[in-house]
Image (tube, rainbow, N blue to C red):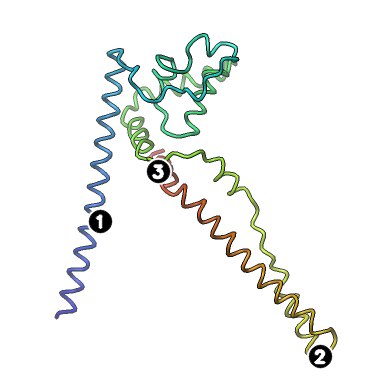
C-alpha cells in the first residue's frame, strides 16, 4: 500500500510540475504580448523613438543613401518599423532597407505577402512573442558553420586492425603493425572525445535559441 501511495504522489507531483511550467510559460507569453501591443500603441502615438533597437550596427556613412535618409539610428525608419526578434531577421530587414529589390515581380510578391499577413494579427504577434522570449540571441554563423562540417569517422581503421591481428597471429605480418594501429586508434579516440566535448559546448550555447526557433517554426 505504501508503494502505491508513493507512486501516486510521485505521479501527482510530476503532473503538477508540468502544469506549473506550462502556466509559467503562458504567463511569460502574456507579459510579452502586452509589451508588443504597448509598442504598437507607441507607434500610433508617434512615441516610437524610445524603442531600444535602432539598428546602429548597420549605420554606414559611405552607403549611397542610408546615412542621409536616416535609415538607421535614433529616430530612423528602422527603429520605427523593426519588429524582428532574431539576429538573421534584423540583418534581413537592414538588407531590405539598404539593398531594395526593384524588380516588379518581387515587389508584387512581397505586397501579396504583406496583404495576407495584415489580417493575421494573432499569428504575427504569436511569432513575435516566441522570438522575444529568446533572451540570448546569438549570431548563428558559428552554429551554421559547425553544422556544415562533414563528420570524419575513420571506420576503416578497425577492420584493418582486425585483419592485421589475424595475420600477425599466423606470423604473416609483424605484430608491431596491429599494435601500432591499436595505439593510433586509442589516440584518435581521445582526440575525438575532446573534439566532441567542444562540439557539444557549441550546441549548448545555442540551445535556448534553437528551442525558440522550434516554437516559432511550429506556429508556421
Of the pair 148 and 219, the residue shown nearer to us: 148
Residue drawn at x 48%, y 34% is 87
Residue drawn at x 49%, y 21% is 110
Number of the label disc, if any, that sits on residue 170: 2
Residue drawn at x 66%, y 73% is 186
User: In the rendered view, would you say 128 is above or below 100?
Assistant: below
> Which residue has dot 3 on it?
212
Q: CA distance from mark 2 to mark 1?
A: 63 Å
Q: Secondary structure at mark 3?
A: helix
User: In the rendered view, would you say 132 is above or below 58?
Assistant: below
Residue 47 rendering spot, x and y as whole percentages: 30, 15
Of the pair 46 and 15, the residue shown nearer to us: 46
- The quarter of the picture where residue 126 lies is top left
Which image quadrant: the N terminus?
bottom left
**On the rendered structure, is 132 left or right of 34?**
right
Q: Does label 2 or label 3 sit earlier along the sequence? A: 2
From this viewpoint, which residue is outermost toward the bottom? 170
- The number of numbered discs placed on residues in the rendered structure image is 3
From this viewpoint, which residue is outermost toward the top? 68
Q: Secondary structure at mark 2?
A: loop
Q: CA distance from mark 1 to mark 3?
A: 19 Å
> Which residue has dot 1 on it?
18
Amino acid at each position: 500500500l505504501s508503494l502505491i501511495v508513493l507512486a501516486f504522489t510521485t505521479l501527482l507531483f510530476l503532473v503538477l510540475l508540468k502544469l506549473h511550467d506550462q502556466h509559467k510559460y503562458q504567463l511569460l507569453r502574456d507579459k510579452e504580448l502586452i509589451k508588443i501591443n504597448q509598442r504598437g500603441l507607441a507607434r500610433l502615438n508617434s512615441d516610437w523613438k524610445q524603442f531600444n533597437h535602432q539598428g546602429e550596427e548597420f549605420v554606414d556613412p559611405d552607403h549611397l543613401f542610408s546615412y542621409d535618409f536616416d535609415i538607421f539610428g535614433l529616430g530612423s525608419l528602422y527603429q520605427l518599423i523593426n519588429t524582428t526578434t532574431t539576429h538573421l531577421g534584423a540583418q534581413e530587414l537592414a538588407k531590405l532597407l539598404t539593398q531594395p529589390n526593384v524588380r516588379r515581380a518581387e515587389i508584387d510578391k512581397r505586397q501579396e505577402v504583406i496583404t495576407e499577413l495584415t489580417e493575421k494579427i494573432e499569428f504575427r504577434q504569436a511569432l513575435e512573442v516566441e522570438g522575444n522570449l529568446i533572451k540570448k540571441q546569438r549570431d548563428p554563423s558559428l552554429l551554421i558553420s559547425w553544422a556544415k562540417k562533414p563528420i570524419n569517422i575513420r571506420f576503416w581503421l578497425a577492420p584493418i586492425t582486425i585483419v592485421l591481428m589475424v595475420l600477425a597471429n599466423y606470423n604473416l605480418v609483424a605484430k608491431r603493425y596491429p599494435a601500432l594501429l591499436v595505439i593510433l586508434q586509442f589516440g584518435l579516440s581521445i582526440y575525438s572525445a575532446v573534439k566532441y566535448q567542444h562540439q557539444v559546448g557549441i550546441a549548448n550555447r545555442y540551445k535556448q535559441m534553437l528551442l525558440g526557433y522550434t516554437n516559432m517554426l511550429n506556429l508556421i
